[in-house]
Image (cartoon, rainbow, N blue to C red):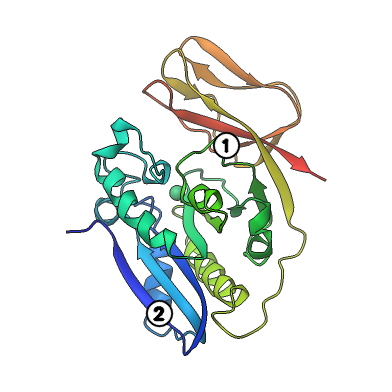
Amino acid sequence: MENFRIVEKTGKETGRTVVIMAGVHGNEICGINAFEKLLPELKLDKGKAIFIYANLEAIKQKKRFVECNLNRCFLKKQPDEVKNTLEGKTAVQIMKILDSADILLDIHASNSVDSVPFVIGEEITWKFAKVMPVKIVSFNWDEFEEGATDAYMNNLGKIGLCVECGYVNDPKGQERAETAILNFLKKAELLKGKVKETKDQKFFKITSLYKNKYGPFKKVNDFADFGYLNEKTLIGHDGDKEVFAEKEYNIIFVRDRQDLGQECFVLAKEQN
Ligand SMILES: [Zn+2]
């Protein structure tokens, strides 16, 4: 059996083909719940929307992933350690669907308790990023996070963006996911109706991704996503080594890590 499920909606008139994904990380259920709420009633005016429940086994187990992070598997050439995993194989099948689509919206939630909702989207996606119900747009991820769904689309010269709907257990996440889906469908002209841009969005450029080199990584604090570091700040310990950020960075996704070479945190800078 396949590790993903598809619901397709087609409008009366021809139009774009879009993909909307949820459950790429199985514990981030806001997008799944939004699908359940919206899809039974949803009728498109134009084009085709393919809704994908992306990692059914992880969704069932309420886990981020089963064998490896699905959101690093969207690569034309997958590394050997990915190829034979459940998620590696799942990505190969979903990539065929992405190849047929013009635009992707991928719905996620953050594991940080203090997370604010934000978009991950390169400059070509900003037309869509600007109608997402978030105050923060972050970009320049592709060079650090190879194999992400949005990066896969961008590499094909297509629009792929990801919306992070807040903390995984925030009950407002589902509402944000629903708004994101409807606004996205309107902006892509699959649904009729005007959609307003979100006011006062801030733009952050991702500048680095830290992977642990010496041992397990332990954070010293639960840093809020996009929290501002106004002085040199101890972030955590990589084995016995202290890891600092220089001042004037914003920090995202700080996580404890056991195995070497894992993603521990990301730094970003606000663009004016
Ligand atoms: Zn996620």
Dot 2 crowding, Cα within 10 Å, few <14, some 14–19, many 20+: some
| Residue 149 rendering spot, x and y as whole percentages | 46, 51
Tell whether label 2 touches label 1 (CB within 8 Å): no
Q: Is residue 23 visible?
A: no
Mark number displayed over residue 52: none
Q: Of the two numbered discs 1 and 2 on the same chain, state the one appearing first in sequence.
A: 2
| Residue 142 rendering spot, x and y as whole percentages | 56, 41
Dot 1 crowding, Cα within 10 Å, few <14, some 14–19, many 20+: few
Q: CA distance from mark 1 to mark 2?
A: 33 Å
How many marks do you count on the picture?
A: 2
Asked if residue 174 lies left or right of residue 97, the reply is: right
| Residue 243 rendering spot, x and y as whole percentages | 58, 18
Q: Please, is residue 66 above or below residue 117 in the view?
A: above
> Does the residue tagged 2 have its C-beta within 8 Å of any atom of ligand 1?
no
Quadrant of res 186: bottom right
Residue at the location (50% across, 71% down)? 178
Q: Which residue is mark 2?
A: 9
Quadrant of res 6: bottom left
Q: Is residue 189 visible?
A: yes
Residue at the location (24% across, 45% down)? 86
Q: Please, is residue 29 above or below residue 227 in the view?
A: below
Quadrant of res 50: bottom left
Q: Which residue is mark 1?
A: 143
Considering the image in quadrants, where does the N terminus appear? bottom left
> Does the residue tagged 1 have its C-beta within 8 Å of any atom of ligand 1?
no
View extreme (right): residue: 272
The amino acid type found where label 2 is placed reads: Lys
The amino acid type found where label 1 is placed reads: Glu
Residue 149 vs residue 256, the one in the foreground: 149
Q: Please, is residue 267 above or below residue 183 in the view?
A: above
| Residue 11 rendering spot, x and y as whole percentages | 46, 85
Asked if residue 60 lies left or right of residue 79, the reply is: left
